[in-house]
Image: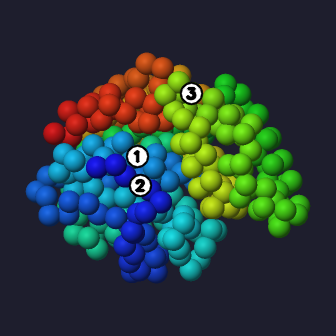
Amino acid sequence: MNFNFEEINYDSVVLENQTSIEYKYFNSHSKKNPIVLLYGLVCNNRHFQFQIDHFVNQDYPLLILNYREHFGSKNPSGIPECSFENIATDVVLLLDYLNIKKPHLIGHSMGVNIALEIAIAFDSLVDKLVLISGSPYRPQDYMFNTNMSYFIFPSVKKILSSNKKLGLKFWENLHRIKLIRKMILDGGFNPKQVTDEFVMYYTKKIGELGFDLFFKLIEEMKNHNLSSKLHLVKNDVLIMGGDADNIAPIEGQIIFEKYIKKASLYLIKDGSHVPQVDFHETVNEKISTFIS
């Protein structure tokens, strides 16, 4: 199976909290424990393309979805209520609607925050957790080995918002700027393993979401300090990260391992912030062993 993300025919449901969620559920009649994939901040499901291919072919029931205010998923309250807690609630309501029992949650980057929100609040609903490139602290404190993002993000937001129409036009066309793509490739991926085409698709999708959502979720990341909650996680947890991650350095993965009671850590040599793309065969094999 080779997944074409431009041709996904998402299903849609309006949940009891009025969130309209796009989702796709593969192999729904399989008897294996389902897998739920939770992507990162203003990302998309293509960040899991190799995991979708692998686990669907292994006959796992597998659920992908778009969070509220992402692409075709909406809530009447809009971006102001796009919090991690509300996204986690949406996921739980979707699991109930689809009658998905004891799924494994695989979260990447911000998806780690969502997975942990679900596991802490609804630990009996889920089985194992795989946490890839997450951050127990505010990533703004140490992204790219500096705290300059505390000053950079507000400045960029102010510039883009000063002329909303021009700001949105620029944001929507980020993927056309080769220098921007090169910065994203070098900063967030292993450039020896990932193509410019992949980064162009990713950046194009960021443009579709708009900068208001981006900065709202950046604020959520800043205020979502997981370190005080990690002892509440009761599930078996596999923590994964790249040793060359500039966005969520390996020190954070070590903290996860230390404070989550039933956690194991696997570091990927030369892995970036997106090791499930860089070294997907290694990551898939490790996850398969962990959940089987």
Q: The C terminus lies in which quarter of the figure?
A: top left
Instruction: Say which label, 2 or 3, has the lower sequence index.
Output: 2
C-alpha gap between disc 1 and disc 3: 18 Å
Write down the residue under mark 3.
191
Hey, which quadrant is residue 4 in on the image?
A: bottom left
C-alpha gap between disc 2 and disc 3: 22 Å
Q: Given contact means CB atoms under 8 Å apart, are the residues at marks 1 and 3 in contact? A: no
Q: Amino acid at mark 3?
A: Pro
In terms of depth relative to the viewer, which is nearer, 189 or 68? 189
For residue 4, the mark is: 2
> Residue 171 at what x, y percent from top left?
74, 56
> Residue 162 at what x, y percent from top left?
88, 61
User: Residue at 41% of width from left, 23% of height from top?
Assistant: 268
C-alpha gap between disc 1 and disc 2: 12 Å
- Disc 1 on helix, strand or loop? helix
Q: Residues within 10 Å of mark 2 (few under 14, many from 20)?
A: few
User: Residue at 63% of width from left, 61% of height from top?
Assistant: 208
Picture layout, residue 19 above or below residue 127: below
Q: Amino acid at mark 1?
A: Phe
Q: Residue furthest left?
A: 31
Hey, which quadrant is residue 282 in on the image?
A: top left
Instruction: Say which label, 1 or 3, has the lower sequence index.
Output: 1
Write down the residue under mark 1.
48
> Residue 39 at what x, y percent from top left?
46, 50
Whether residue 179 can be seen here? yes
Q: Is residue 175 left or right of residue 24?
A: right
Q: Residues within 10 Å of mark 1 (few under 14, many from 20)?
A: many
Whether residue 252 can be seen here? no
Q: Is residue 181 left or right of residue 287?
A: right
Q: Given contact means CB atoms under 8 Å apart, are the residues at marks 1 and 2 in contact? A: no
